[in-house]
Amino acid sequence: MHTGDAASRSPGAVLHAPKLYDFQVWLFTLGRERRLRRHMAELARLREGDCVLDVGCGTGGLSIEARRRVGATGSVHGIDASPEMIARASIKARRARLAIEFLTSTAQALPFPESRFDVVLCSLMLHHLARKSRAQCVREMRRVVKPGGRVLVVEFGSPAKHAQGLLARLHSHRHGYVASPDVVGLLHDAGFEIVEQGPVGFRNLQFALAIAAKGRDA
């Protein structure tokens, strides 16, 4: 890690039950996970030939969708702090006959050189990290994305005052959320320029699409 405090060293809330995770995703999306992943890929403006990193990839759903989008000339890497999640993601990719490199790693110390990727995806992961670790994670994303490259962050926004559904309320209570202004602030401080932001169109999910500012050190 790059700093010495305990919060920075911690990988955050690491999930170790991939089958339960997949079941919870199925419940949260009411069986429409593939539809949600496709929409996220569209928000990231993925195109053929892109080199993509999926930070906090979980069991690989978004990585697999990204791999389908970037085609034979593109590539996708996925990292997660949970070896169990990475193992299940690798199985899913093999079953889909897609070449994706999955690695066990924390988001605060990405195992890649500077300016490696065209696109970095960060979906429903930041809320698992302590505040200091969130900033470190976003700085790492800025380090590994190319100048002018894109970063998509999708997070649970602030819970709405009206009912959102039992599962959404339970998740917000148990795991928390990262309000949109906080996401935008993290991206701006790390050297990104926001190009689009708003609701994903699914429950209380919010997104921010940003570009790595050219000519600024990470």
Image (cartoon, helix red, strand yellow):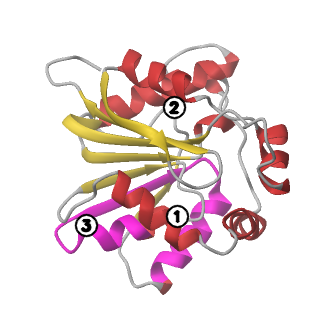
Numbered disc in front, either 3 or 1: 1
Name the amino acid, label 1: Leu
Pointer 3: what residue?
A: 70
Distance between the alpha carbons at the discs numbered 3 and 2: 26 Å
The residue depicted at 70 percent of the width and 71 percent of the height is 30
Snapshot quadrant of residue 111: top left
Element marked by disc 3: helix
Name the amino acid, label 2: Gln
The residue depicted at 43 percent of the width and 61 percent of the height is 39
Stretch in magenta: 65-94
Percent position of residue 160, x then y: 73, 37
**Mark 1 neighbour density, 10 Å: few (under 14) some (14–19) many (20 or more):** some
Q: Nearer the viewer, residue 176 or 105?
A: 176
Residue 63, compared with residue 179, is above or below; it is below
Badge number at residue 108: 2
Numbered disc in front, either 2 or 1: 1
Is residue 80 at least partly visible in the picture? yes
Snapshot quadrant of residue 74: bottom left
Quadrant of the rendering where the C terminus is positioned: top left
The residue depicted at 31 percent of the width and 36 percent of the height is 144
Q: Nearer the viewer, residue 93 or 150?
A: 150
**Left or right of 128, for residue 168:** right
Q: Nearer the viewer, residue 42 or 116?
A: 42
Q: Nearer the viewer, residue 175 or 194?
A: 194
Q: Main secondary structure of the magenta part?
A: helix
The residue depicted at 59 percent of the width and 13 percent of the height is 4
Name the amino acid, label 3: Val
Pointer 1: what residue?
A: 36
